[in-house]
């Protein structure tokens, strides 16, 4: 999976339109192999981003959980700790 696509479900506050659009863009970039499409492919590329964003909205709206919403700041701090540990282990090897 593309490392730049973040989990969007079960956060308080919920994922924003911008976050969903960014995830859709990263997904289309990964699948297509284009960071920036040519003029000939631009319309198809942008249409795919919009369609995936719409499907993602629908998915997130339909999912249910009993777990409390995660705090974005706490999850970001945990991710930084995991990253620091991972790179410390790699550098020590």
Image (cartoon, rainbow, N blue to C red):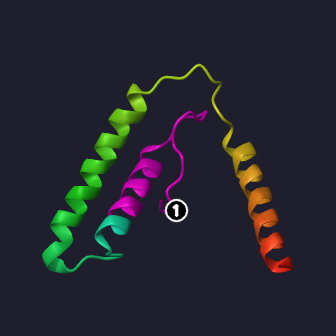
Residue located 76% across and 58% down the image: 82
Q: Residues within 10 Å of mark 1 (few under 14, many from 20)?
A: few
Q: Quadrant of the C terminus?
A: bottom right
Residue placed furthest toward the front: 93
Locate residue 7, reporting x and y percent.
Answer: 54, 46
Residue 37 vertical position relative to residue 5 in the rendered view, above or below = below
Figure quadrant of residue 60: top left
- Please give left or right for residue 36 compared with residue 9 in the image: left
- Please give left or right for residue 88 compared with residue 66 in the image: right
**Residue 17 counted in the magenta span:** yes
Q: Secondary structure at mark 1?
A: loop
Residue located 43% across and 55% down the image: 23
Where is mark 1, residue-wise? Answer: 4
**Residue 47 counted in the magenta span:** no
Residue located 17% across and 73% down the image: 41
Residue located 44% across and 51% down the image: 18
- The boundaries of the magenta stretch are 1-28
- Please give left or right for residue 51 compared with residue 92 in the image: left
Locate residue 17, reporting x and y percent.
Answer: 42, 45
Locate residue 44, reporting x and y percent.
Answer: 17, 64
Locate residue 36, reporting x and y percent.
Answer: 32, 77
């Amino acid at each position: 999976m593309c490392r730049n696509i973040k989990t969007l479900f079960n956060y308080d506050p919920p994922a924003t339109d911008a976050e969903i659009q960014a995830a859709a863009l990263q997904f289309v970039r990964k699948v297509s192999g284009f960071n920036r499409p040519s003029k000939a492919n631009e319309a198809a590329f942008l249409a795919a981003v919009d369609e995936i964003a719409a499907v993602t909205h629908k998915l997130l709206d339909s999912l249910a959980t009993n777990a409390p919403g995660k705090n974005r700041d706490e999850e970001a701090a945990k991710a930084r700790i995991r990253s620091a540990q991972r790179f410390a282990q790699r550098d020590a090897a």
